[in-house]
Amino acid sequence: MAMILVGNGTVVTRDEERPILRDGCVAIDGNVIVCVGGLAETRARYDGARFIDARGGVIMPGFVNAHMHYYSAFSRGLPGKGAPAQNFGEVLERLWWRLDKALSLDDVYYSALVCMIDCIKNGTTTVIDHHASPLAARGSLFRIADAARETGIRSCLCYEVSDRDGERIARDGIAENVDFIKYAREDGSGLIAGMFGLHASMTLSSETLAACAEAMGGLDAGYHVHVAEGPSDEEDSVKKYGARVIERFRDFGITGGRSIAVHCIHTNRDEQEILRETGTAVVHNPESNMGNAVGCCPVLDMRERGVLLGLGTDGYVSDMLQSYKIANALQKHERRHPNVAWAEIPEMLFANNPEIAGRYFDIPMGRLRPGYSADVIALDYDPPTEMTGDNVNGHLLFGASGRCVRTTIALGRVLMENGELTGIDERGVIQRARECSKRVWERF
Ligand SMILES: [Zn+2]
């Protein structure tokens, strides 16, 4: 790969030594950043490199989405069947557990492509995904990996094992996780990684959890699981197993420094202490939680207790700035206090998400600094008030959205330049997606 320079903008580095650099430039060699400096001297130093003009906008690290469902794309506009859901359990039964069973391997692939194109447009360069397609489980993660390779979106993948569709499909899910984890480890591109996916405590018997732990063996890839999204997950665990969800998961070795517990809305103090102690990351998905009316994740309390917290979209969108805005407003609303969460939410998105992703990929990310992964985006944003290293998060909160992103580079590969997608036939993909989704809707 030839050298690339992204310059002529305000560089927001996320590097505490030099948080903001006016008229700056980022130099990329292969998949790493090699220099961050002033525009004139960087251009002179790397004479002949390809130059991408940020046109006076903001240059910053690409976003990480710490919890996503690539399989969700065909839910958009889906006509419901039967009575509308009255609670979260019915949302699962009447929407998601019907949609995922209607997916073929081709649908999985096109759904992923659609989401990844959306990631490129919104500046999301790394995604930690949680996948389900029970009637097409085997091979599904490999098809998503194909989509990742074609689009260039770095993806950490897993298949959500569950008992809800019977023993054979649970076994398929286990085998898919193990095969993919091993495959991703050998891949060497830095673009894909594997984890072990689990749906949620309430759909996993102790026999199945034991089988998962056994299949994981010494792989130590970490688990990715929904936790206490609705109150019923905790009630089910206490009733059936005499333990709360996180206590139950700890006993199976599911918590740990490479594991992700998603939501954790109804966890109690003891469970949060286990999450902290084991280094398990918690990922908050504010828009999804509000939409499903399941409650508000106590992220401020957990932060105080030292839990590592990240931010995801749970398949709602691929725009991390949307999740960022909603997370900010939700904590203030929930606490009935206008001055909370100013520091915690930016920390989740800009510092913790890259840290969490860094547990699965070898290269450090989330900063514009030599040696870091060349995940660089440029936004059309011309601040109407002074922008400094101290208030840049407020500018992004109130002045920017994902669709301000004009240029997206992931692992040194230019995926979008000044609003034009490079190397992917977007219209062709969307057209195929519409054809696939029509058949999915018929089977739904
Ligand atoms: Zn989810």
Image: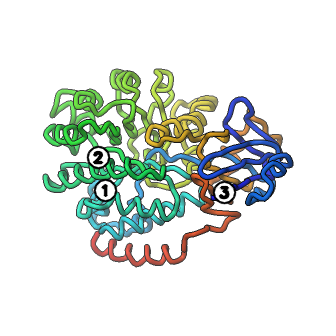
Above or below, 138 against 289 in this view is below
Q: Which of 346 and 16 is in front in this view?
A: 16
Amino acid type indicated by mark 2: His
Query: Residue at 19% across / 51% down in the picture?
Result: 170
Residue 132, disc: 1
Residue 270's x, y, as percent? Answer: 33, 21
User: Answer yes or no: do the residues labelled 2 and 1 have beta carbons within 8 Å?
Assistant: yes
Residue 385's x, y, as percent? Answer: 82, 43
181 lies left or right of 290: left
Q: Nearer the viewer, residue 286 or 126?
A: 126
**Mark sitting earlier along the chain (2/3):** 2
Classify mark 2: residues with Cα within 10 Å, few (<14), some (14-19) or many (20+). Answer: many
Above or below, 407 against 325 in this view is below
Q: How many labels does the image show?
A: 3
Classify mark 1: residues with Cα within 10 Å, few (<14), some (14-19) or many (20+). Answer: many
**Mark sitting earlier along the chain (2/1):** 1
How far apart in space, not on screen, are marks 2 and 3 (Cα)? 33 Å
Amino acid type indicated by mark 1: Ala
Which color mode does the image show?
rainbow
Amino acid type indicated by mark 3: Val
- The quadrant in which the N terminus is found is bottom right
Q: Name the residue under label 3.
A: 405
